[in-house]
Image (tube, helix red, strand yellow):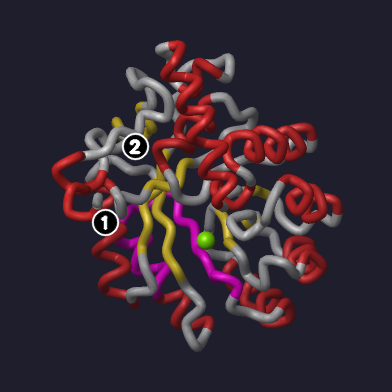
Amino acid sequence: MALAAIDMALWDAQARLLGVSLAQLLGGTAKPVPAYGAVGYDGEAKSARVAEGWARRGFTGVKAKIGYPSIAEDVAVIRAMRAAVGPDVAIMVDYNQSLTPEEAVQRMRVLDGEGLAWVEEPTLANDFAGHARVAREAATPIQAGENWWGPIELQHALDVHASDYVMPDVMKIGGVTGWLRATSVAATRGVRISNHLWPEVSAQLLSVTPNAHWLEYVDWWSDALREPLSIRAGMTDAGGVTGSGIEWNEAAIAPFVR
Ligand SMILES: [Mg+2]
């Protein structure tokens, strides 16, 4: 992760030297990608309320953490969100590796009727065979990738069809260089590609990524940035920046800088 940070900083510096955005440095231009908002492990009422908030702001997708003690509770949360956002907003769910493959297969039999856009990390991220079993048995697309370390892990996962979609984390996959290598492998196999966290850098990268799918939007670090990634009508708006677009909000970070 340290090397990935240095890799990202060097690509950013090169783009700034040339006065272009990271997407332009990589041969492309800012491309709008649909963004989804995050919902926590918050139960029926709060999950519905947070999902509704994202939809009101124009987001066309929401993703909730599930993995409640029973599948009935998982379904209740999904249906509460569906009632809150209406039929046209994509709903994704994330188990964060919490099920055994067998449990996941059983829960997927129920979830397959809920019209979900994807089910993420139903079982251990590095259990590629387990993931492949779930992906094979489920009708709903399986999503994974945020815990894969580098392009070779992504390749090994796709070799056994562990996931239908991929969502590498630019910090874990090896920075801009690792992202380009990993997504090349995914793209040649026709796999749709989203990101995990780091929305500013990821919006630049998804602009030049074949099969770009969704941007995971989080605003957890926005206070530290002068201009956090802008979202317009639910789509990324990654143009008009230099480098990765990350500029510190100096006043906000001053207390942490010695
Ligand atoms: Mg996740």
State the residue lying farthest toward the bottom: 69
Q: Earlier in the sequence, mark 1 or mark 2?
A: 1
Q: Residue at x 45, y 68 (%)?
A: 65
Residue 52 is marked as 1
Q: Residue at x 22, y 48 (%)?
A: 253
197 left or right of 156?
left
- Mark 2, Cα crowd under 10 Å, few <14 / some 14-19 / many 20+, is many
Res. 135 image quadrant:
bottom right
Q: Is residue 242 above or below residue 107?
A: above
10 left or right of 125?
left
Q: Secondary structure at mark 2?
A: loop
Q: Which amino acid type corresponds to the residue marked 2 in the rendered image?
A: Gly
Q: Secondary structure at mark 1?
A: helix
Can residue 221 be spotted in the picture? yes
Q: Evaluate if marks 1 and 2 touch, with contact meaning CB atoms under 8 Å apart.
A: no
Residue interval drawn in magenta: 77-97
172 left or right of 46?
right
Q: Residue at x 26, y 40 (%)?
A: 225
State the residue lying farthest toward the top: 18
Res. 91 image quadrant:
bottom left
